[in-house]
Image (tube, rainbow, N blue to C red):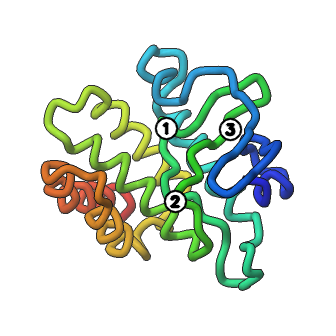
Amino acid sequence: MAHVAAHGFPAPAVFAADGTDLVMERLHGPVLLDAVAAGERDAADAGRVLADLHARLHDVPSRTRDPHERVLHLDLHPANIVLTGRGPVLIDWTNAADGPPGLDVALTAVILAQAAVAPGHEHGDAAARMLTAFLGATGRQALALLDRAVARRAADRSMTPAEVRLLDDAAALITSIAR
């Protein structure tokens, strides 16, 4: 977080770090998902916010300085964006790593698509609208590493078996929208 913040990316300020303990800035505002659910933000606008955060994040050089890699969040979705007075701030950097930006974009698309294809998901319609706007703003970038993103998501131990079963339908939705 300190690395990306030093490059002007909107992440919480880190005041102190000792091992896994962090003292961070307290953020005030709703998360983007709640703002969309409450009708305070348009779902298509939310998709563009996601795309903008990806573009800004992927302008930050990797910590390894490999010119082909960038800092990746790897969990950038509407519930990890706090809408503060200074604008959207990305939280939950647990999965952050360096790598190809397309993987980060593809993972966001997969997360949105899973909600969109889940029968009866409370945010399914909004997720579909966010996904369409997100893919429109990021172009075909999600397609190049879609298989890798799906595999990564399937290997996530926090996923339920029902969520894993949605991955093929989610990938098909992404492909149909992005082509």
Q: Earlier in the sequence, mark 3 or mark 1?
A: 1
For the point 39% across and 37% down, the residue is: 129
Q: Which mark is residue 78?
A: 1
Q: Amino acid at mark 2?
A: Asn
115 lies above or below 168: above
Q: Which mark is residue 89?
A: 3
| Image coordinates for residue 71, horizontal then vertical, percent | 66, 67
Query: Which of 179 and 92 lies nearest the eye of the viewer?
Result: 92
For the point 31% across and 66% down, the residue is: 150
In this rendering, would 58 be left or right of 39?
right
In this rendering, would 148 be left or right of 88?
left
Q: Earlier in the sequence, mark 2 or mark 1?
A: 1
For the point 30% across and 71% down, the residue is: 151
Q: Which mark is residue 95?
A: 2
For the point 37% across and 70% down, the residue is: 146
Q: Crowding at label 2, few (<14), some or many (≥20) Cα neighbours within 10 Å?
A: few
